[in-house]
Image: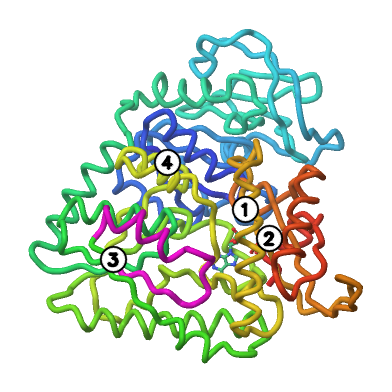
Amino acid sequence: MIAVIDFGSQYTQLIARRVRECRVYSEIFSCFTAADKIRKRSPQGVILSGGPGSVYASRTATFLPFFELGVPLLGICYGMQLMAEIGGGRVKHSRKREYGYARIRRTAHPLFSGLPRHFTVWMSHGDTVTALPPGARTIASTPTTQIAGFAWQNGCALQFHPEVHHTEYGMQIIDNFLTKICRAKKNWSIGRVVDKQIEEIRQQVGHTKVICAVSGGIDSTVAAVLATRAIGRNLIGIFVDNGLLRAGEVDEVRSMIAPLVNLRIVDASARFLTHLRNIKHPEKKRKIIGREFIKVFEREARKIKNVHSLVQGTLYPDVIESGKGIGPSAVIKSHHNVGGLPRKMNLKVIEPLRSLFKDEVRKMAKVLRLPARFIHRKPFPGPGLAVRVVGGITEGRLARLRQADSILQEEAVKLPGYRDIWQIFAVLLPLGSVGVMGDRRTYDAVCAIRAVYSEDGMTADWVRLPQDFLATVSRRITNEVKGINRVVFDITSKPPSTIEWE
Ligand code: XMP
């Protein structure tokens, strides 16, 4: 195991994933984790991430223990500056800040084994190491930064970011650290995780029954399929139809998931719609949906005898105790996740994906041989169409949106770049607009089209959809959906907008 210490860099998770891509298992620890806790996990190496702080700020001393673990260290950016400071070197704010590409000249060091003398790297720093710790030697320089890398005792350090793909040979550098310096074995793979998880679930639950809230999304399905491989029909997946699903979704989920998992579909749509009728405020909608979901799920769970555990598709990013949690962060939306059930249900929680990143879960889905159309299914929010019917929810407005959205989906799958689009969907606006149809005045609703590219949903850019496509969709929606007489196209990125309208 390689421990990645998070000092709040935006790239920490990327470092951990790169290590795993080299087939070595990695875990992220907050920079406030006690060294003893990390020592107990017996890491073969430690990587210190970058971070937004400056090492000459007073908190530095608390990070000393990482140096006492006695295993090879790799400091990246802030991690390098920390190493310099602790070793007795000097770090200064530099007027020559370096952001973006830089040309590096390297010396001989195992980190650079097999690499050319000069190559291009990605820099992002305002502070610079100006004096080395006694006994250290420089291993890389750029025209602006004399000390762009150094080796010292059991550590090596880089000012640039080997984890980002802009750095040439970045993966090779990480691989060299793992294999040539830490002597780590490259034996971690998703296939092995699958076997291990199946075995663990089997041992944990014995002959008791296990339930799992299935949303139709990849995480809950993969978790349920894993558990099914372990205990067969004793795993019961519960899919709640909350009346906020897209056209044909219940049948789609049934046809995709029922062959893989012992599945119960519960129609609770009337109950959800009664509680949501005419509710306008997005946060209120989310709260009601979350609350009702829990009630329905608990009621269904009680009907099944001998249930002792609950499987959830929690992913690694949700469990990382990150260094970033230092300051207050604003709540933009209280995301309601179908999997987010309360622990007070008195059931043992089993989270077979809790060490995995999203892309690793996709790989796992392939190992488990889930159908490709499922693996490439686009994300859909837990509160469903409730957050796409902007304003008050009524059955009529939901029906209108459903029809408009299914026309959009029918056309979208024909787009050549469809797979690369993160989400494409229709939104019903709480606006009346004047139109004219067959010589008559209309006063109907406006529908917006939203399509975005995104890596992880955190940021997004709008898709430059072809004009002919937009024309077809607009014509079909206004012709076919009664009550919509205008279609607009959303051309905002995230930030400043969010992906969903509510
Ligand atoms: P936003 O709108 O916050 O969306 O930019 C980012 C991603 O999250 C999805 N989303 C949700 N997913 N419960 C969910 O499970 C929610 O309440 C929720 N709100 C947004 C959204 O579809 C996008 O992929």
Some atom of ligand 1 lies within 8 Å of the CB belonging to the residue at label 2: yes
Front-lying residue, 319 or 454: 454
Some atom of ligand 1 lies within 8 Å of the CB belonging to the residue at label 1: yes
Front-lying residue, 205 or 75: 205
- Name the residue at 65% across, 34% down: 89
- In the depicted structure, whether residue 281 falls above or below residue 110: below
- Distance from the alpha carbon under mark 2 to that under mark 4: 25 Å
Amino acid, disc 4: Ala
Q: Earlier in the sequence, mark 3 or mark 1?
A: 3
Q: Secondary structure at mark 3?
A: strand
**Residue tagged by mark 4?**
372
Tell me the tag on residue 423. 1
Front-lying residue, 113 or 148: 113
Q: Is residue 349 visible?
A: no
Tell me the tag on residue 499. 2
Amino acid, disc 1: Gln
Residue 163 picture location, percent across and down: 57, 33
Q: Secondary structure at mark 4?
A: helix
Front-lying residue, 154 or 401: 401
Q: Which span of residues is magenta-colored? A: 238-261
Tell me the tag on residue 95. none
Q: Residues within 10 Å of mark 4 (few under 14, many from 20)?
A: few
User: In the rendered view, does 41 fall on the left or right side of 54?
Assistant: left
Viewer-nearest of discs 2 and 4: 4
- Distance from the alpha carbon under mark 1 to that under mark 4: 17 Å
